[in-house]
Image (cartoon, coloured by chain):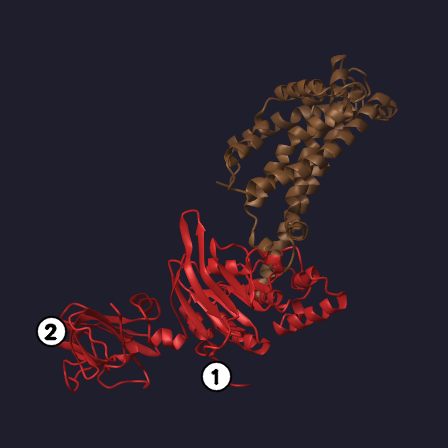
Amino acid sequence: MKSLGSIRRSFAPWTDPSAKPYISFRNVTKKFGTFVAVDDLSLDIYHREFFALLGASGCGKSTLLRMLAGFEQPTSGEIILDGVNMAGTPPYRRPVNMMFQSYALFPHMTVEKNIAFGLKQDGMPKNEIAERVAQMLKLVKLEKFATRKPHQLSGGQRQRVALARSLAKRPKVLLLDEPLGALDKKLREETQFELMDLQQDLGLTFVIVTHDQEEAMTMADRIAVMSAGKVNQVATPAEIYEAPNSRFVADFIGDVNIFDGLVTSSENGMLDIAVGEGFTIRTPIGNMDVRGASRGFVIRPEKIRVSREAPANAGINSARGEMWDMAYLGDMTVYFVKLPNGQTVRASSLNAQRSVENPLGYDEDVWISFDGDAGVLLKD
Amino acid sequence: MNRWTPFNKVSITFGFAFLYLPILLLIVYSFNESKLVTVWGGFSTKWYASLLENEALKDAAWVTARVAFTSATIATVLGTLAALALTRYTKFRGRFLFSGMIFAPLVMPDVITGLSLLLFFVAVNLDRGIVTVILAHITFSMCYVAVVVQSRLLSFDRSIEEAAMDLGATPVRTFLQVTLPVIAPAVVSGWMLAFTLSLDDLVISSFASGPGATTLPMKIYSQVRLGVTPEINAVSTILVTIVTIGVITASIITKRREVQRQRDEQAAFAQG
């Protein structure tokens, strides 16, 4: 099997200023009555990209997808697909296909007929249809179920029929609306990797809508984090996780600690933030002089160490606290340390050994510490 | 609470007796040898034989069949379209009024409907006959169809229509290839309802009909006014039999389908 990682690493058209976007949303607004579902949104998606729209329900991500599919028309703004303005093009003339959250299989048709439906609409000759259907059935490993009807299939099988049906016409873009929502965890994880392989093999552009951040992180080349009809950040999963551009994104993706404090000094490219008594954060942040301003510092739990002994340079990027709570999760242990200012810090450590001598216990006085460059400074 | 208490037994006996004793009596007396309806003179099927020679009754039956078939079919088309419009285009002004108006004929007294239709036919100078009867039957049975189809459409998953369009089907093809096959059972039962309603309507037919367009219920009614003959009992028994067979067949089909479906679903989940 080829290494997905190496292909993915070299794939970054968004960093190339001469690259032409494949799908462009330009100042798209969609209103339902007085409710603004999508608010002056601009977004570029590139050819062969696996792009995820991530957000809580009601953030406008599904509306965006439905506008791309043609089920909704933007109130203003335009959508360009492969150089063509999609305004006024009905869903049945768009070179995109969608996989629906409910799968939306035709209940009165067999699996074969479901998959052949789109091809028939195009007037493809019968023998070619049969060939393509067989090929799709093989792709989703449902050869044995060709003559079954949807209600005779399990959830996972229905999901694969829906996938085969939406891929049968070889669309330029495949839209996936919460495609794995109805599957159980194990099947969902398997399917995620299948989808990624499929996207690579077929060389298609995938746009997926999901509220599951793990799903988005696993599959997508880039993620757009959305809220209230706007895009908060568009970046690779690693960038989104390690360098969130706002409090909202930091909080939305994964677990996070945010320390707020006043910037007391800014020298030699190092910034000091006084979080509380005996707790100062010193972080390299370039040439920004923001003395006197209140700033937040974002750091992920796994980047915080917990120890009994005071670290060197105690008080700088470290603080004393009390072990408030602990959770053993198997692969790792999560510690909740309460600082003197009342803030509870979440820290996690990998359980690399099977047992630890003299483990940390409840109510113990401990130190938390981290590296100054392990977190991100927020703009507010 | 699953036990047969004496109270339960009595209530069920009385209930069913109340419902079916008159019909039972009618059926029994259709096999009466005697010409007198209330006196049992022994078993005979001669009234069924004499039915075959009664041209007037046969004509009426033929009129009824034509009226019922035609009006049910047209009412089903119109009622289905009305149901679609009312469930799909939910944003137009006065929708509430319109959906209320489609239910109104259900509770409208037949006499009023009949009278208003008669006035209308006179006003537009339409000669009364089989055409006006059909028109009248369409009018009152259409709303029944609309109600039946509408209730199916409310639980209809619109995303399958979107899927069809997404796959390249125009709205018309989507309707014919996806929507209609899925709601077909409701449309068929709407048709059957309209057919039955037309079959046994008396009041509205009496207002709307004219010479040469006497339906079976009208014929029966007019004959009964001259005295009930066992012949009428016989023809009524045939009607009851047809309706009963229809209802039983329909419910067996529905039941079977449901059982089959459940079995399929269980099988699908068992094999994962």
What residue is drawn where x is 80% and y is 18%? B211
- Can you identify the residue that label 2 sits on? A277
Residue extending farthest to the left is A277
Residue A287 at what x, y percent from top left? 23, 79
Report the chain holding disc 2: A
- A172, above or below B149, in the image: below
Give the CA separation, mark 2 to mark 1: 46 Å
Q: Colour of chain B?
A: brown
- A357, above or below A130, in the image: below
Query: On the picture, is A351 further left or further right than B115?
Result: left
- Can you identify the residue that label 1 sits on? A10
What residue is drawn where x is 51% and y is 34%? B94
- Visible residue check, residue B263: no
- A365, above or below B172, in the image: below
Query: On the picture, is B41 further left or further right than A332?
Result: right
**Which chain can be seen in red?**
A
- B259 or B94: nearer the eye? B94
Q: Quadrant of residue A321?
A: bottom left
